[in-house]
Image: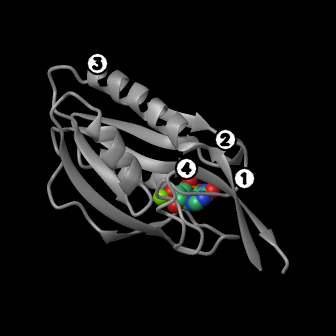
Amino acid sequence: MNVKIDVMIPESDITARIKELAAQISRDYEGRTPHVICVLKGSVYFTAELTKYMTVPVTMDFMSVSSYGNETSSTGIVRIVKDLDEPIEGRDVLVIEDILDSGRTLSYLMNLLRDRRPASLRLATLLDKPDRRIIPVTVDYRGFVIENNFVVGCGMDYQQRYRNLPYVGSVTLEED
Ligand code: IMP
Ligand code: MG
């Protein structure tokens, strides 16, 4: 199987959009210190870029989760592979995701975080595939809405590869 990757969103468009989001977030959090939660591994690049252009002070923590089940039968039950280092009670939490697909992982994660009683809880995602949604998720900051193609780059992988591509690329699998 040959993996073909076509540029879907060029790097310059991504950077421009991330700067807009950072400005919007900085306005919304004026006078506060958002506690940014990066959901490993896919959100590493988006988190780094977004926070770099934010003008309010930020603190950061990292979490790693994995969904139970396989691709055909995702249960929506999420296993915490690495939990946060610090409590979030009373903090203004901003969760950063790479891509929102069925919404299963994220709705579970947001509920889990809400139970820890943060002062506020918001979500930023670089990409959103709304047509794939099975469980509704409220998105506060959205980079781009895309169609149902499988994408890589900007942190997103296909079989753990291509995370470091500086653009969002769509994947086509071809017979060799
Ligand atoms: P959800 O629970 O179906 O919303 O799963 C979202 C997660 O699936 C994302 O955080 C990604 O890790 C992964 N994912 C969904 N769509 C894509 C894609 O097009 N490329 C790479 N990863 C994806
Ligand atoms: Mg992810």
Contact? badges 1 and 2 (CB < 8 Å): yes
The location of residue 113, given as percent across then percent down, is 31, 50
Circle on res. 27: 3
Identify the residue at image location x=42%, y=34%. Answer: 18
Label 2 near label 4: C-beta < 8 Å?
Answer: no
- Mark 3 beta carbon near ligand 2 (under 8 Å): no
**Mark nearer the N terminus (4 vs 1):** 1
Which badge, 4 or 2, is on the more N-terminal residue?
Answer: 2
Residue at 14% x, 21% y is: 31
Residue behind mark 4:
167
- Residue linked to disc 1: 149
- Disc 4 to disc 2, how far (Cα)? 14 Å
Whether label 3 touches label 4, CB < 8 Å = no
What mark, if any, has residue 146 been given in the picture? 2
Q: Position of residue 45 (x, y in %)?
A: 39, 53
Residue type at mark 3 is Arg
